[in-house]
């Protein structure tokens, strides 16, 4: 049996998926790349994310990635998105087409901090949906 795959949120119903929002948080030091990971403990569909950064610096960047435990980064949904220094809520994505992720993969926020001094507090909230239906 394999988890049902979804191509559009119109396929979502209470028999097929259950909302299972999750978050990952961490501290990013200046002049460093910091990975903040969330491991998928069940098959899921992700439809979006909200990125929060406290004390971000202009010039900092972030990437949203999917990481395989053996093969490393297998997909990147956002590449070097610029961080605004004057707001904590950086962006919110909520898409009509989900990404289907099997158990064991990681969702990674890669935060790339400039050399400007100061620790950045980073958090990402994922709009995950646990897949309930299986296909033969």
Image (tube, rainbow, N blue to C red):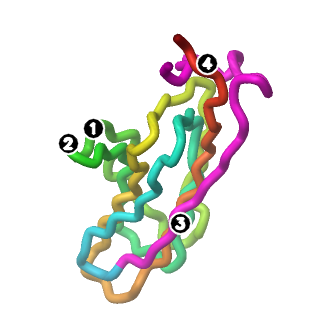
Name the residue: 51% across, 48% down: 41
Q: What's the distance in space between the residues labelled 3 and 4, CA to CA?
A: 27 Å
Check if mark 2's residue and mark 1's residue have beta carbons within 8 Å: yes
| Dot 3 or dot 4, earlier in sequence | 4
Mark 3, secondary structure of its residue = strand
Side of 128 relative to 66 (left or right): right
Q: Which residue is mark 2?
A: 71
Residue 98 located left or right of residue 82: right
Is 27 covered by the magenta stretch? yes
Task: Decide if residue 36 is on the left or right side of residue 87.
Answer: left
Q: Is residue 121 magenta?
A: no
Residue 123 x %, y %:
53, 66
Q: In the rendered image of this protein, does residue 69 appear above or below residue 6?
A: below
Labelled disc at residue 123: 3
> Which residue is found at the position 49% from the left and 29% from the top?
100
Residue 8 numbered mark, or none = 4
Mark 3 neighbour class, 10 Å CA radius: few under 14, some 14 to 19, many 20 or more: many
Q: Which residues are magenta?
A: 1-28
> 109 or 17, which is in the foreground?
17
* Disc 4, SS: loop
Q: Position of residue 34 (x, y in %)?
A: 32, 69
Mark 2: few/some/many CA within 10 Å (<14, 14-19, 20+): few
- Identified at 36% across, 46% down, the residue is 65
Q: Are marks 1 and 4 in contact (CB under 8 Å)?
A: no
- Dot placed on the residue nearer the N-terminal end, 2 or 4: 4
> Which residue matches tag 1?
74
């Amino acid at each position: 049996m394999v988890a049902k795959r979804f191509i559009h949120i119109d396929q979502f119903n209470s028999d097929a998926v259950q909302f299972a929002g999750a978050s990952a948080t961490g501290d990013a030091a200046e002049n460093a790349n910091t990975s903040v990971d969330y491991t998928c403990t069940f098959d899921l569909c992700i439809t979006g994310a909200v990125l929060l950064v406290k004390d971000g610096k202009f010039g900092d960047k972030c990437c949203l990635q999917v990481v395989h435990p053996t093969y490393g980064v297998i997909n990147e949904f956002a590449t070097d998105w610029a961080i605004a220094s004057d707001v904590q809520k950086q962006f919110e994505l909520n898409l009509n087409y989900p990404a289907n992720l099997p158990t064991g993969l990681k969702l990674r926020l890669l935060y790339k901090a400039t050399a400007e001094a100061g620790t950045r507090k980073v958090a990402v909230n994922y709009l995950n949906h646990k897949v309930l239906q299986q296909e033969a």
